[in-house]
Image (cartoon, rainbow, N blue to C red):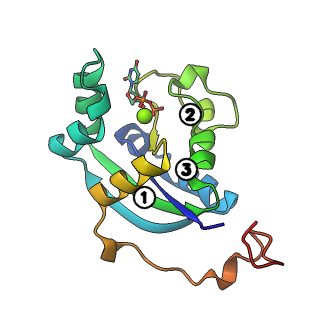
Amino acid sequence: MPLERTLVFLKPDALVRRLAGEIISRFEKRGFVIVGMKLTCITEDFARSHYAAHEDKDFFEPLVRYTTSGPSLVMVLEGKDAVRVVRDMLGRTFGGDSPPGSIRGDYALSNRYNLIHGSDSLEAAVVEINRFFNPEELVAHNRENIKWIYDMTGTEIV
Ligand code: UDP
Ligand code: MG
């Protein structure tokens, strides 16, 4: 089972509300490893391309303003089933619909200010990782230390 990589970013509200440590901690405790990280103000061009699928929606312009309103913390997380599991950890799109125990379900109520983005498919993850990171900005971890996160008694990571 190859390990997946997914792109997440803590949106400006997460940083204003001082929730970065809390949210990163959840991913670390779950077993994901950070392979890339940058604190950056997402530019309007990046925000428009990142959310291009929503450009016809009435919330598109406010979403671009929100995304560019302050620093975001952009990360690449690596782990088993990273794309699906990280999306599950986020909750649902609207904070108020998200179950307790999820990031949005514990810290968000808004439909827009929902703290965090996570890639929604493996294909999207590849595009998004390449949008925000050059290959040399991603680190290789020694995988020796993951044997208590995954069952590696056989040849596969389970
Ligand atoms: N959003 C919004 N109003 C809506 C739906 C979405 O402002 O009615 C914002 C919200 O911040 C969301 C982002 O647009 O995270 C992208 O929407 P999407 O449906 O892709 O949600 P996500 O994949 O982030 O759960
Ligand atoms: Mg989405």
Image mark for residue 83: 3
Q: Residues within 10 Å of mark 3 (few under 14, many from 20)?
A: many
Residue that badge 2 annotates: 104
Quadrant location, ligand no. 2:
top left
Q: What is the C-alpha distance between the residues marked 1 and 2? A: 17 Å
Considering the numbered disc 3 on the image, is that residue within a helix, a strand or a loop? helix
In the image, what residue occupies the spot 26% across and 34% down? 52
The image quarter containing residue 3 is bottom right
Q: Is mark 1 within 8 Å of ligand 1?
A: no
Q: Residues within 10 Å of mark 1 (few under 14, many from 20)?
A: many
Q: Nearer the viewer, residue 99 or 69?
A: 99
Considering the numbered disc 1 on the image, is that residue within a helix, a strand or a loop? strand
| Residue 42: x %, y % from top left | 24, 47
Front disc: 1 or 2: 1
Q: Residues within 10 Å of mark 2 (few under 14, many from 20)?
A: many
In the image, what residue occupies the spot 59% across and 39% down? 103
Instruction: Check disc 3 and give the amino acid type.
Output: Val
- Badge 3 vs badge 1, beta-carbon distance below 8 Å: no
Instruction: Check disc 1 and give the amino acid type.
Output: Met
Residue that badge 1 annotates: 75
Considering the numbered disc 2 on the image, is that residue within a helix, a strand or a loop? helix
Front disc: 3 or 1: 3
Image mark for residue 138: none
Residue furthest left in the image: 45
Which quadrant, please, contains the C terminus? bottom right
The earlier-in-sequence mark between 3 and 1 is 1
Relative side of 122 to 157, left or right: left
Q: Is residue 12 above or below residue 130?
A: above
The count of marks equals 3
In the image, what residue occupies the spot 22% across and 24% down? 61
